[in-house]
Amino acid sequence: MSLLPEIFLQRVRDSAERDAFGQRGTGGWTWASWGETGERAMALAAALLATGFRKGTAVVVLSTSRREWIELEVAVLLAGGVVVPIHPATTSAAAQDIVRRAEARWAFVEEPLQAEKLLSLLEPTGPLGRVVAFDSLSRLPGADAHGRLEIALADVAAGAPGVFSHAELLESGRHELRRGAEAAVRKRLAEISPDDPATIVFNWSAAGRPQATVLTHDNIAFTTAGVPRELEITAQDRTLLFLPLAHVYPRLVVWMAMHVGFAVGFAPARGEALRAAAEMHPDFLIVVPRFLERLRRGLEQEMDRGPFWLRGGMRWAFGIGSERNDAMAAGRVPLALDLQHRVADRLFHVALRERLGGRLRFIICGGAPLDRQTERYFGAVGIPVLEGYGMTEGTGLATFQRPSRPRAGTVGTPLGGMQLRLAADGEVLFRGRNVMRGYLDDPAAAAEIKDPDGWIRTGDLGALDGDGFLTITGRKKDIIVTEGGKNVSPLHIEQLLRGNPIVRDVVVVGDRRPHLVALIVPDEKEIAKTVLLEGILLGSRDEAAAHPAIRALLDAAVAEANARLDPFLQLRAYAVVPDLDAAGKSGRARRQALVERYKDVIARLYVRR
């Protein structure tokens, strides 16, 4: 069985009364059963088909992670459509570009302010036919210029045809089902093939624009079928999800739930994840390194503010936990160490685990390299962190650690049924049914990353040990992966800045860091021109670069570039440096050399934030 809607409908039949998807609201947690989810998805699919929805129609989803997102995805797939997620922080221009490239006819958005990003595409000559909002109100953090605390869908739509609420569409679909429309949904389902596209995922690429990866029903079904068993996840488990469903990584968790029947709760916001975990008591978590590293720093800061006896006790307990984990990896835990660990666990570790709900068996971490200190921190308190590795072109997963065979410092062993090897230069290659169909509108780029035999060239360098465990050692391509798992093309941002006369040279920095910063060399001719026009008296080049008039020009250059970039690509700070020469090195080697040379300057940029 490789059709995603069939997997879902089987889960609805097998687990109709069990909790499926939960959401935290003002009144606490509410849960929808698999049966309720199935009814709503079927109604939405019927509503789509009643409008003449054709097989292969693309539907964009611009929303945070929530229960309706999942119901909509299943409905689109039941109707033979293709789901195109857009990150909720995406700018209007970038979101509209995705709609045009995907030739989307429908857009589902979270609320009116998100709808506003796409409404201009509803014009008679525009690509969109309908925009549907999950919520009919946008609640503002404070009064806007008109004194409003909330904005209704009617306020932004201004009578535009083709704008509906989710509730209207759902009720329309239920009406269609009462008239026997389920037969039409079943008929459309019979027309779908495992090789048909299920989703198109847009990710930033080295080309300076998002690359559109086409994944099929079979790609996702194959990738998710066996993973829950190898992770020892059962239908009795629950997980908390706060990553954006715009990425394929968290969506895999949802489809794993459909295979097995475990429950998925959606945190109201990432900043409230800790409180949500304490309330929901998840059995496992799926995160990116940035979340864990921030959580660790926050917990350490709390500990440092505590009384001296607590600080000393926690440090002793962490040391004991780490020592015991090392002994377990070596195959033997001395009795004295085991006894100390039992005391440390009862007095200290259990309190930290309770902060995360008290039931966590492990945390799965992927999307970017994980700091080893963070891995040891959580392992020491009895919450193993299992790293995984993958890329969108391989449906988000290529290797992962199993709870029964953890190996610190590695990203585990390959997904069952796929092949993995290293090229002569150490590049990681893989192939299997998880490999993408291709890129939507860039066959040349697809041919570059996927060879005729189906091997994906990852651009990452790795090492395999004798047991088949993969360690990622570096990257061939000049791509930055931020602490939050965002893939960034620094060249694109640098080109934007070099287009400003005041910038002679620039290097963008941010690999394994929370955000991007830059090192800038100002143009001496532009400095001289400004000095002359402003009548500035300066004694040195360093003094010139620090002058408020010159800084204002640099600030404006950075602001102008940021205005053309999505939020996660924007520069948060910059420093002026004398030169960016790197002894003839280019690409990633040049970037690494300059990061090492200016490491103290870069460190100060991040401290300021």
Image (cartoon, helix red, strand yellow):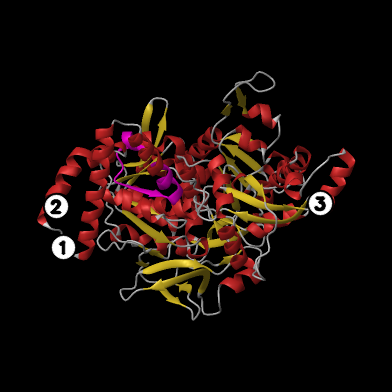
With respect to residue 443, does 83 lie above or below? above
Please check the rendered image and state whether residue 281 is part of the magenta-colored stretch, yes or no. Answer: yes
Residue in the foreground of this view, choosing between 415 and 344: 344
Q: Earlier in the sequence, mark 3 or mark 1?
A: 1
- For label 1, the crowd category at 10 Å Cα-Cα, with few meaning under 14, some 14 to 19 and many 20 or more, is few
Name, please, the residue furthest toward the right. 533
From the image, tell me which residue sits under label 2.
338
Residue ID for mark 1: 332
- From where the camera sits, is residue 286 visible? yes
The quarter of the picture where residue 38 lies is top left
Q: Closest to the observer: 309 or 535?
A: 535
Is 416 left, or right, of 121 in this rendering?
left
Residue occupying image coordinates x 45% and y 36%? 271
Helix or strand or loop: what does disc 1 sit on? loop
Instruction: Name the residue that disc number 3 marks.
Output: 501
Residue nearest the viewer, comparing 445 with 361: 361
Badge 3 local density, few (<14 within 10 Å), some, or many (20+)?
some
Which of marks 2 and 1 precedes in the sequence?
1
Task: Name the side, left or right, on which 384 lies relative to 296.
Answer: left
Amino acid residing under circle 3? Pro
Residue 180 in the image: state x and y as whole percent: 47, 44
Residue type at mark 2 is: Asp
Residue furthest top in the image = 147
Start-end of magenta stretch: 277-295
